[in-house]
Image: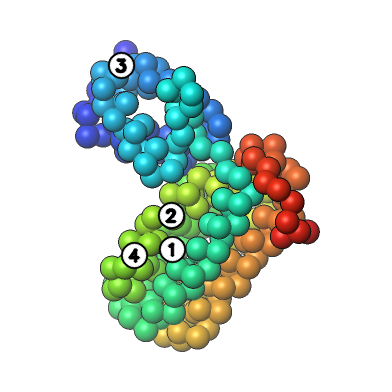
């Protein structure tokens, strides 16, 4: 039996299949199969895939078919560099501007992430952990920073879920690092919050570099010319 799905839901449901890790990196997205699963015509599925292509989550092949985007090592490094600029600034400003409601929401999101981690639900943990960072961005009250954060966040989720699945111990480290970030924001200490976020991102990048041999398989990372940056 077909699922009853309205056309406005198609984009969100296809995107969720990608960001939840239900569809693997590099996997082909067959328009007719998605349409059958969602119970819609092919037209809204094609429109959803075109939108996801514009957002960088899928790519279109020579035969006009789509697949989930594969990351190059350069893509991954650029993503970490962008996060270092945007998310460190977010933590700094959130420490100065987050009110009680925002702090409560952050604390609840961290508790949600912890529950998922305890249940070994790594995809849900990754989503909740990024939800915490989304709340930090919102707390800056800076629309430009929020817009930049949103532009990279989906790619962070796409990359992160596969990274965590390839090395589950990293999830526990993320939980501890996020707690340190929250504690600094809660204390209103902008300097410590920025340092905690920078430390979190440095740990993530160091872990990524150590994991490159395995990730080349798990993520289908496309190689780039050797520059010495990954030694």
**Mark on residue 146?**
4
The kind of secondary structure element at disc 4 is helix
Local crowd at mark 1 within 10 Å, few (<14), some, or many (≥20)?
many
User: Between tags 3 and 4, which lies in front?
Assistant: 4
Local crowd at mark 4 within 10 Å, few (<14), some, or many (≥20)?
many
The kind of secondary structure element at disc 3 is loop
The residue to which callout 3 is attached is 2
> Between marks 4 and 1, how big is the CA–CA gap?
11 Å
Q: Which residue is drawn at 36% across and 32% down?
A: 49
**Mark on residue 153?**
2
Local crowd at mark 3 within 10 Å, few (<14), some, or many (≥20)?
few
- Asked if the residue under mark 4 is in contact with the one under mark 3, i.e. CB atoms within 8 Å, the reply is no
User: Which of disc 2 and disc 4 is earlier in sequence?
Assistant: 4
Above or below — where is 188 with respect to 200? below
User: In this rendering, does residue 69 appear at all?
Assistant: yes
The kind of secondary structure element at disc 1 is helix
User: Which of disc 4 and disc 3 is earlier in sequence?
Assistant: 3
Q: Which residue is drawn at 32% across and 13% down?
A: 1
User: Which of disc 2 and disc 1 is earlier in sequence?
Assistant: 1
Provide residue 136's location: percent of width, then percent of height. 39, 68
The residue to which callout 1 is attached is 133
User: Between tags 1 and 2, which lies in front?
Assistant: 2
Local crowd at mark 2 within 10 Å, few (<14), some, or many (≥20)?
some
Farthest right residue in view: 231
Image quadrant assignment for residue 32? top left
- Asked if the residue under mark 2 is in contact with the one under mark 1, i.e. CB atoms within 8 Å, the reply is yes
> Between marks 4 and 2, how big is the CA–CA gap?
10 Å
Above or below — where is 90 with respect to 133? below
> Between marks 3 and 4, how big is the CA–CA gap?
37 Å
């Amino acid at each position: 039996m077909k699922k009853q799905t309205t056309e406005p839901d198609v984009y969100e449901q296809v995107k969720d299949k990608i960001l939840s890790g239900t569809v693997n990196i590099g996997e082909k997205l067959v328009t007719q199969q998605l349409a059958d699963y969602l119970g819609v015509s092919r037209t809204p599925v094609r429109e959803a895939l075109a939108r996801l292509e514009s957002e960088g989550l899928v790519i279109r092949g020579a035969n006009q078919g789509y697949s989930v985007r594969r990351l190059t090592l350069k893509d991954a490094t650029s993503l970490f560099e962008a996060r270092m600029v945007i998310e460190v600034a977010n933590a700094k400003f959130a420490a100065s501007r987050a009110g009680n409601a925002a702090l409560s929401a952050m604390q609840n999101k961290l508790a949600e992430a912890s529950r998922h981690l305890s249940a070994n639900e790594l995809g849900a943990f990754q989503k909740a952990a990024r939800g915490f960072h989304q709340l930090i961005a919102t707390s800056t009250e800076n629309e430009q920073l929020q817009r930049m954060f949103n532009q990279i966040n989906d790619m962070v989720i796409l990359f992160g879920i596969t990274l965590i699945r390839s090395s589950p111990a990293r999830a526990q480290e993320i939980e501890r690092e996020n707690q340190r970030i929250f504690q600094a924001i809660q204390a209103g200490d902008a300097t410590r919050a920025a340092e905690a976020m920078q430390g979190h991102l440095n740990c993530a990048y160091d872990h990524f570099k150590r994991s490159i041999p395995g990730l080349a398989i798990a993520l289908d990372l496309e190689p780039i010319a050797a520059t010495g940056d990954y030694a």
